[in-house]
Amino acid sequence: MTLRGTLPLSVAEGPAEEERDDASAELLAAVDAARAGNVDLQELMRAFRRAVLAVEVIPAAAGHTLRQVWYEGLCWLPVFSDLRQLAGFFHEAGWTEEVDYGLLSGAELIDECLPRLPHGTGIMLDAVGERPFALPPVVGIVPESLAVATPEEEPSR
């Protein structure tokens, strides 16, 4: 992860048009296809792993950690396709302070960060953006060792 600094929340109010790198544009195209019902999980995850994502970085005793949000008993890691999305998330939450952030690839997030978070943590992309997208902690999205069982996988009683 590359620690990039402190983001002023005024970025959330910036221009609507923004430049995206090819990997981010590819990820958002894959998300749009999935939201339209054209789910190709392998292509979606390839695009996610290549994309550069923004995350909030929180100082911790052992260096830094990433913000996690608990919702209805599940842990979610909010990640953002760009800095405007990150700032918008905190702006919507009423946050008035600056936010420390880092940039990392989706591969780094899945392979290096998720194993350090609570088991069963899912990924929430652009939570308050125009196209929020949840990636649940299931096989095919996260490594098998981090996945939770789906109802189809649970043994019958």
Image (tube, rainbow, N blue to C red):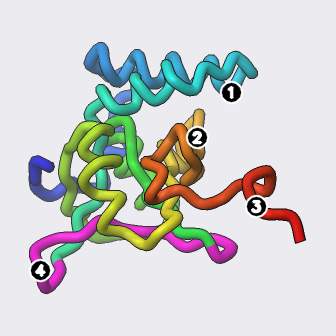
Q: Residues under labels 1 and 3: Cα distance?
A: 27 Å
Amino acid type at image mark 4: Ala
Q: Is residue 155 left or right of residue 6?
A: right
Residue interval drawn in magenta: 60-73
Q: Residues within 10 Å of mark 1 (few under 14, many from 20)?
A: few
The residue tagged 4 is 62
| Amino acid type shown at disc 2 | Phe
Tell me, yes or no, if residue 41 can be seen here: yes
Viewer-proximal residue, 16 or 56? 56
Task: Indicate which label's residue lies in the foreground, 1 or 3.
Answer: 3
Mark 4 or mark 3, whichever is nearer to me: 3
Label 4, label 3: how far apart the Cα atoms are? 36 Å
Q: Which is more N-terminal, label 1 or label 2?
A: 1
Q: Which tag is nearer the camera, tag 4 or tag 1?
A: 4
- Answer with mark 4 or mark 1, whichever residue precedes in sequence: 1
Helix, strand or loop at label 4? It is loop
Secondary structure beneath dot 1 equals helix
Closest to the camera, between mark 3 and mark 2, is 3
**Contact, mark 4 vs mark 2 (Cβ under 8 Å):** no
Type of amino acid at the residue the image marks with label 1: Arg
Residue position marked by numbered label 1 in the rendering: 35
Q: Which mark is residue 154?
A: 3
Is the C-beta separation of discs 2 and 1 under 8 Å? yes
Q: Quadrant of the C terminus?
A: bottom right
Question: Secondary structure beneath disc 2?
Answer: strand
Q: Which residue, given by chain and number where applicable, does mark 2 sit on?
A: 133
In the rendered structure, are the residues bearing label 3 and label 2 in contact, judged by CB atoms less than 8 Å apart? no
Q: Mark 1 vs mark 3: which is more N-terminal?
A: 1
